[in-house]
Amino acid sequence: MPQWVNLIIVPIITGALAGAVINGIIEFCRAKKRRTKILSALKAQLASLPRINLHNTTATNPTASPHHVLPMPYPTESFEIAIFSDGGIDVKKETAQATIDYLLKANELNILIKTLHDFHLQYSTIVRPPDNLAPTKQFLYDQANNEMSKVIKSLTKSIEDEKKWWQFWK
């Protein structure tokens, strides 16, 4: 091998490989930091879900709910953006499925909650509005009391597992 190859080509190839390796490490660290921030934000959002669910259970309880208390919509946008957008995080299949399950249930219940809100606005001048939406309230109560609690627990576990997996790479 000629001397000029050792003096010119070998350092260029070595430098390019070292640069590629360093760049890969830097990109991994940036991605890890971004994912950790997103997962922390989701975990904070998850902390409010049991309270929202309790409020909705109370607001729709057919035997004890006061007529002036309305259910609150479940948050969905932050989960959609974090998990499914281009700038979101890459997640395990279980986390994506738990998020899909939550979003389906939350969107289903949010539509009914919006119906109750609209109905309440229509009859806000009446002291006690007609109870035409008793089946809707009953369904919301049953779903918030049973199904949504399970979905929230599953999503919380998946997000916590995801966060633990990324913390492993400190």
Image (spheres, rainbow, N blue to C red):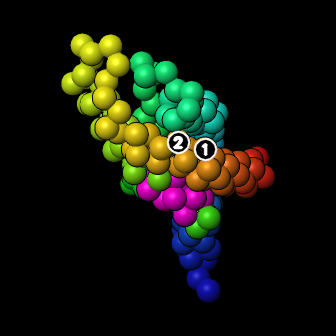
Name the residue rendered at 34%, 44% in the picture: 111
Q: Position of residue 50 (x, y in %)?
A: 63, 36
Q: Which mark is residue 141?
A: 2
Secondary structure mostly seen in magenta is helix
Q: Secondary structure at mark 2?
A: helix
**Is residue 80 a member of the stretch shown in magenta?**
no
Q: Note whether 78 is above or below 168 in the view shown.
A: above
Name the spot of residue 81 as percent of width and height, x first.
42, 46
Q: Which residue is mark 1?
A: 145
* Region in magenta: 95-104
Residue in the image at 51% along x and 59% along y: 101
> Does 69 appear above or below 152?
above
| Callout 2 touching callout 1 (CB < 8 Å) | yes
Gap between marks 2 and 1, in whole Å? 6 Å
Residue 83 as seen in the image, left or right of residue 150: left
Q: Assess disc 2: are there few (<14), some (14-19) or many (≥20) residues with their C-alpha within 10 Å of its C-alpha.
A: many
Magenta-colored stretch includes residue 97:
yes
